[in-house]
């Protein structure tokens, strides 16, 4: 089995830059909190062959001296287990790695395996999307959903578990598509997956896209055209909100709700 490396933020590393580093290598930051809620450590894990990529990306982000890389001396599964716990999200979802406790009664068990694909359910941008999907599904009949930038498949799989009959998911990264397919099977749901960076030319009741500002703006005409009723966008910083709103206002869409969550 390939060895894993732990990448830890030193106190002088800005949380946003550290999160950008994790995202650049397809990982998610896990935060360790003190009992009073204060974040006392930020870490993520990468397989050994991604180490060079981490170091190059850290230098590019000005984090070269502000992170600590350590080869895990214990089995990496144990390391994940210590820090990656099940996440209750919204009223009905329970997102967890395979080794965490299963959902309690009344919650839908959504299992995501550790991988290089983004979307463990621990990231605020993912959690906001999951909560929005759940709220919309409870509010009205959502017959079809498009998940753009599916990563691990977490949003599309959640929609299928919540009862959306048709889920289509795309990602420009073939590794993500493979992981999403495996996760869909793991959760016993059928979703249609494809590798690509352009939405299909048809309409969906609900479109979700948790990617960065630049692709969200570039895709505005196509995502707006694919949306029959609702569009959920995530993955941006607060300061970028106006730019995003303007891009979609130009396509005739208006904001119904915006929510922020830090992390
Ligand atoms: C932040 S992750 C989101 C993963 C998951 N949907 C979630 O909410 O946790 C963004 C994903 O979008 C993919 N991506 C970025 N730009 C894209 C584009 N134009 N078309 C399709 N996928 C894209 C990346 O490969 C990555 O897997």
Image: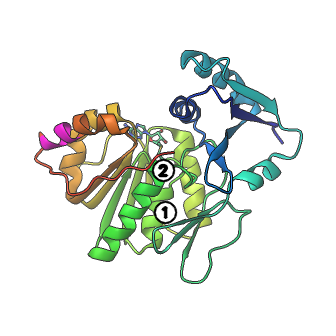
> In the image as oriented, which residue stretches furthest toward the bottom?
105
Task: Return the disc, 2 or 1, that comes first in the chain's sequence.
Answer: 2
**Is the residue marked by circle 1 packed among few (<14), some (14-19), or many (20+) residues within 10 Å?**
many
| Left or right of 261, for residue 145 | left
Residue 202 visible, this orientation: no
Tell me where the magenta segment starts and ends, as one range: 245-249
Q: Residue at x 33, y 31 (%)?
A: 214
> Where does label 2 land, which residue?
124
Tell me: residue 79, above or below residue 186.
above
| Left or right of 99, for residue 136 | left
The percent position of residue 110, horizontal first and vertical second, equals: 57, 66
| Left or right of 141, for residue 173 | right
Along the viewing direction, whichever of 79 and 207 lies nearer the viewer:
79
The percent position of residue 182, horizontal first and vertical second, equals: 60, 56
> Where does label 1 land, which residue?
157
Q: Main secondary structure of the magenta part?
A: helix
Q: Residue at x 43, y 50 (%)?
A: 261
Task: Tell me the quarter of the image containing the N terminus.
Answer: top right
The percent position of residue 30, horizontal first and vertical second, equals: 64, 46
- Image quarter of residue 104: bottom right
> In the image as oriented, which residue stretches furthest toward the front?
36
Tell me: residue 105, above or below residue 169.
below
Q: Which mark is residue 120?
A: none
Tell me: residue 78, above or below residue 214.
below
Q: Residue at x 57, y 48 (%)?
A: 178
Element at label 2:
helix
Is residue 187 inside the magenta stretch?
no
Along the viewing direction, whichever of 114 and 138 lies nearer the viewer:
138
The percent position of residue 192, horizontal first and vertical second, equals: 43, 58
**Is the residue marked by circle 2 packed among few (<14), some (14-19), or many (20+) residues within 10 Å?**
some
Along the viewing direction, whichever of 130 and 195 lies nearer the viewer:
130
């Amino acid at each position: 089995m390939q060895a894993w490396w732990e990448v830890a933020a030193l106190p002088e590393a800005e949380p946003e830059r550290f999160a950008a580093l994790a995202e650049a290598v397809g990982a998610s930051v896990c935060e360790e909190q003190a009992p009073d809620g204060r974040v006392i450590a930020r870490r993520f894990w990468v397989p050994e062959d991604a180490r060079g990529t981490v170091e190059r990306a850290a230098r590019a982000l000005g984090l070269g001296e502000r992170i600590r890389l350590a080869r895990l001396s214990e089995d990496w599964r144990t390391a994940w287990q210590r820090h990656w716990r099940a996440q209750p999200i919204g009223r009905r979802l329970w997102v967890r790695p395979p080794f965490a406790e299963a959902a309690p009664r009344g919650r839908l068990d959504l299992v995501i395996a550790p991988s290089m694909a983004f979307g463990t359910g621990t990231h605020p941008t993912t959690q906001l999307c999951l909560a929005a999907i759940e709220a919309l599904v409870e509010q009205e009949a959502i017959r079809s959903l498009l998940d753009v930038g599916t990563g691990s498949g977490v949003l599309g799989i959640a929609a299928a578990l919540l009862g959306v009959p048709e889920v289509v998911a795309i990602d420009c990264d073939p590794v993500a598509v493979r992981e999403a397919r495996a996760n869909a099977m793991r959760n016993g749901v059928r979703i249609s997956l494809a590798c690509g960076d352009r939405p299909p030319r048809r309409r969906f009741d609900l479109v979700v896209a948790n990617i960065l500002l630049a692709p969200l703006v570039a895709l505005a005409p196509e995502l707006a055209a694919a949306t029959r009723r609702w569009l959920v966008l995530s993955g941006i910083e607060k300061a970028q909100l106006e730019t995003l709103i303007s891009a979609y206002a130009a396509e005739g869409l208006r904001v119904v709700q915006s929510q922020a969550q830090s992390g």
